[in-house]
Image (cartoon, helix red, strand yellow):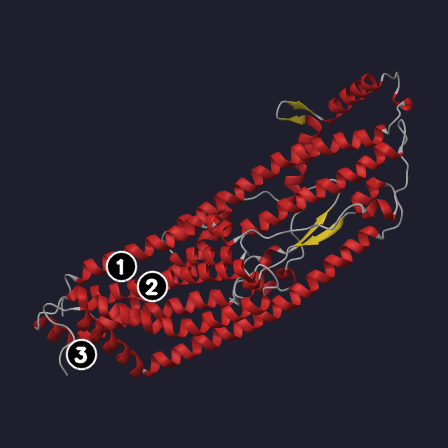
Amino acid sequence: MPSPCGRHIGSDRMLAVVRNELRLQRRDGRLALLTVLLVTMVGVALLAGWNDYRRGEAERIAFSDQAYRQWVEQAPKHPHRAASFGLYVSKPEGPLAVVEPGLRPFAGRTLWLEAHNQASFSYAAADDAPRAASGLGERSGAGLLQLFAGLLALVIGALSVARERETGVLRQLLAQGVRPTRWITGKYTGLLITLAIPMTFVLAAMFAFVIVGADHSREDALARLALMALGLVCYLATMLAVGMLASVALQSSRAAFAAVLAFWIVTDLLAPRVASHLAMTFAAAPTAEAYEAEISKDFGKGLGGQPGWAAQLTALEAATKKQYGVATLDVLPVGFSGLRMLAMEDWSNFVGDRHFARLSQTYVQQDRLRDIVAFAAPFLASRSWSQAMAGTDWSHYRHFADEGERYRRVFNRQMNELIVTGTRGQVWEMVAGRDDFAKVPPMSYRSPTAGWAAAQAIVPGLTLLVWLVAALTVLLLASRRLRP
């Protein structure tokens, strides 16, 4: 058979290199077996994710409806006691949660909104499954795909050039004056197409789940899937280039295989644990008890140049008597208890916002530390990107929590205003009923768009792109000095 590569190899000869590489990979039964195992494993994970998603969404809808009915149908009581009774809201998930559950098993999806405190997510699935919380088992389809398809890309890349060197083919090609960069480019393209074949089946399955699972905003869900697929392509193309670089640089297939296996263990298995350890060590979040204690202390003593609650209450009493022209609060035409609760709510929100901003900054620092590690471990960047596109990363949880907090403040203020209009003077006791509670509408939440998600994940996205460009550049530079 004539050589597919000549001294002045053209586009037709380049295609010959690609076709030859595809033929070699097709004949390799081990690769076909690994591909079938990979597709089967990811397929099982997708089916399990679909089952979890459908059951979880059905439970969430039923739970949300029941929680709101419980709020409206609660027994008549004082408005503030009703606000303290509170209500539950639950974060909806997009259909890509089938592929990438992200933080859902660990962060929970439910917020309890009540009168006094900002809510935090609770009722995580990992609380009922300690093994899931330990991180010992990866169940998500995207996680398995990135983990093992990345390994497959590294391995076939590591064996590609080394195999030709050991069989003597590389020596013959170089002796014929083949341009190494063109030959490496053709082999890389052929191997990339080989990887694309099983990935096409997996992405087609993901597409089907999105079409069936997206009850609304289907266009946005498809845009998120396209961005997720783009990130996956960048990651696998990078791993293939890294594998081929090891194959070019090292003299034997055994050495190249050992090198890429070590790279995979460090970047895919160890790096996530190192990133978490660094985040917990250098940007540790306070415990719930310490966090609440600090808020209580600042609420009483003052914050940001403003006095504590006792001094503010004294000033409120004086200002209210002056405003209504009365000597005592007992003769006010409105309920001072309601005015006091409104002022307490504003002050509590002010203090809580300051502390929550500090806590959020801690989480941002943790993400930055993970991003730093991701520059040395593209697997982390790939995971962050896919979770952002699925809407299951921290930025989406924070978005829902912010909307929940706004909703909490609206219904809390409605209850306190009932006290203002429903009592006189310093009278506290009153009763609100179903009609009053029904004036609080159900929480309406709209998930952010794919563009918003991509903007939140700009750092891991750029990290993937930098890794791909760098790996391909170094591979091409190394191929110029290719030796048999």
* Picture residue at 49% right of the left edge, 59% below the top: 224
Does 103 sit left or right of 200 as displayed?
right
Q: CA distance from mark 1 to mark 3?
A: 25 Å
At label 3, which amino acid type do we have?
A: Thr
Q: Amino acid at mark 1?
A: Leu
SS class, disc 1: helix
First along the sequence among labels 2 and 3 = 3
Numbered circle sitting on residue 97:
none
Mark 3 = which residue?
Answer: 167
Residue 439 located left or right of residue 55? right
Residue drawn at x 73%, y 34% is 345
Q: Is residue 351 above or below residue 230?
A: above
Of callouts 1 and 2, the N-terminal one: 2
Residue under the image location 61 percent in, 36 percent down: 355
Q: List x then y, in percent, for residue 469.
A: 29, 55
In the picture of the structure, the residue carrying the numbered disc 1 is 472
Circle 1 or circle 3, nearest the eye? 1
Give residue 449's position: percent from left, percent from top. 53, 52
State which mark lies toward you, 2 or 3: 2
